[in-house]
Structure formats: C-alpha cells, structure tokens
C-alpha cells in the first residue's frame, strides 16, 4: 500500500525564498550503506531535501559515488537504507521492484551523459519507447513523438538512426524521449558532459525553455554554465548536504 506524504498536499516556501511552491519530491533523513562482505560503507548520511514544482536544480560536489547514489534514489533506480523518499504523494522507500518500475516509467524522465539511445531504432522510435511501455496506442505514440521531435528541432531527422546524428542531436532525442510521458521531474546526469561548447549551449537553451514552460529539472553536473542558468544549487560533500542555495527565482 502506498503511503501518502502530507508535505506534498500543501505548499511550502523554497529555500531562501518567500514564494510558496508545491513539493513534488521529498527526501526525509535518507542514508545509504553498501555492504561488501563484512565491510559496510555509508555514502549518504541523513539527507533531507524538498524539491519544488518548476524548479531548476544543479547538484554539485566532488567526483565520487555520492551524487550518483543520490540520483539513483531520486530516479527510483535504488532505494535508501534508511529514511523515506516521497515522489508526489507516494513513499517509494519500501516499494517492490515492479512498483518502482511502474512509478519510474510514469513520472520520471531521464537524460544521460552518454544519451542511452537504442542504436537499432530511428529517432521517432526512440522517442516512442516510453509511450510503448506505458500502453499508448501506436497512433497516439506517433503523434506525441512527432510533436516532441519538432519541439527539439529534429522533425527533419525522424528516420535517422542515432549513429547518423551528431552528439548534440542525439542528446536532443534523449530530451524528447524524457518528455514523452510528461514526467513529474526530469533527471539529468552530466547532460552536456560529452558535448562541445556550442552543442552544450544549445542543449542548455532547451533546458531553459522547458523550465520556463514549468518543467522541473534536476541535474547532476560539473558545468559552471549549467549552474549559472539554474535556480538552485545543492552542494554535496562527504555524503551530506554542504549547502542548498536559491540562486534566483
């Protein structure tokens, strides 16, 4: 049975802000420990954070497993050892794998540094994949995917395979795929890490536009330019939140 999070039923003020916003995801005293035989390593220590509708967040920190572990929990790819993670009003912390898969497919969009496109499928088919798994009809999937391909400027490339596209174009496909199910949150892991400066700036322009349209963006990054465009910066160190700063509204 899914446990409701009362925090998501009201609005609260975002960090360093007097503006009330609805909470779309919430971490409550999250810890994560990895066990290797008799050895245990705790990589997250009591993290509590709220994420707000329409936010544009950059998660920063030294290289290591901490940011990736946190992103995996936020993406319902992993579960905390202790604490609770609410996505919308649902506590995902004790969900079975099939429940996690369902909520992940319906409410989250993912963008990866390496794009993670299916090489055998063309642009349109890659965008349609999440819709297929959510049970959309072929006609509806085609219409939605075509609209998203146009949105990211690839409507003239829908028949091309990933290997026929530039890195920037492949990341545009990944963005369109992430948007397919109209997710609650878009999670991106170093989304410009494999791109040249021009392509990276074009991708960031798309993110700006998506956020201006109300999309909630949460990104792990080392990019200073992405941080400058973000509304909020969360810095992690040694498995804890070092700072959580509202940059601008």
Image (tube, rainbow, N blue to C red):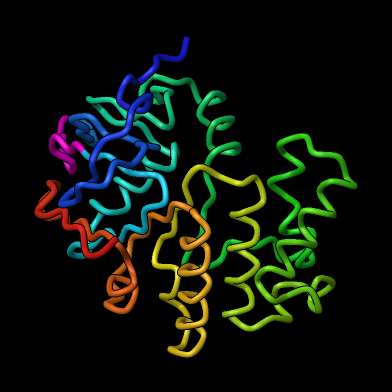
Residue located at (47% from left, 9% from top): 1
Residue 150 in the figure: left or right of residue 49: right
> Relative to 240, does residue 35 appear above or below in the rendering?
above
Residue located at (63% from left, 83% from top): 166
Residue located at (24% from left, 45% from top): 14
Residue 155 in the figure: left or right of residue 118: right
Is residue 36 at least partly visible in the picture? no
Give the extent of the magenta segment.
38-48
> Relative to 151, does residue 70 appear above or below in the rendering?
above
Residue 133 locus on image (x, y percent): 72, 39
**From this viewpoint, which residue is outermost toward the right?**
139
Q: Is residue 44 magenta?
A: yes
Quarter of the figure with residue 123:
bottom right
Residue 197 locus on image (x, y percent): 43, 89
Instruction: Tell me the quadrant of the picture where the C terminus can be found.
Output: bottom left
Toward the viewer: 126 or 39?
Answer: 126
| Predominant secondary structure, magenta span | strand
Residue located at (48% from left, 63% from top): 212
């Amino acid at each position: 049975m899914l446990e409701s999070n009362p925090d998501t039923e009201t609005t609260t003020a975002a960090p360093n802000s007097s503006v009330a916003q609805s909470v779309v995801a919430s971490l409550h005293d999250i810890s994560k420990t990895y066990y290797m035989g008799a050895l245990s390593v705790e990589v997250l220590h009591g993290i509590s954070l709220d994420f707000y509708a329409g936010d544009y967040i950059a998660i920063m920190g030294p290289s290591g497993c901490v940011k990736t572990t946190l992103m995996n929990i936020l993406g319902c790819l992993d579960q905390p050892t202790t604490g609770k993670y609410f996505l919308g009003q649902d506590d995902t912390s004790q969900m079975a794998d099939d429940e996690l898969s369902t909520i992940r497919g319906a409410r989250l969009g993912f963008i990866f540094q390496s794009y993670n496109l299916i090489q055998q499928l063309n642009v349109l088919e890659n965008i349609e994949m999440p819709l297929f798994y959510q049970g959309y009809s072929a006609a509806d999937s085609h219409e939605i995917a075509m609209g998203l391909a146009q949105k990211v400027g690839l409507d003239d490339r829908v028949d091309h395979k990933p290997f026929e596209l530039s890195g920037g174009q492949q990341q545009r496909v990944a963005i369109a795929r992430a948007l397919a199910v109209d997710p609650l949150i878009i999670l991106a892991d170093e989304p410009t890490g494999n791109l040249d400066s021009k392509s990276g700036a074009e991708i960031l322009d798309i993110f700006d536009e998506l956020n201006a349209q109300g999309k909630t963006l949460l990104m792990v990054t080392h990019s200073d330019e992405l941080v400058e465009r973000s509304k909020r910066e969360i810095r992690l160190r040694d498995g804890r939140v070092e700072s959580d700063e509202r940059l601008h509204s």
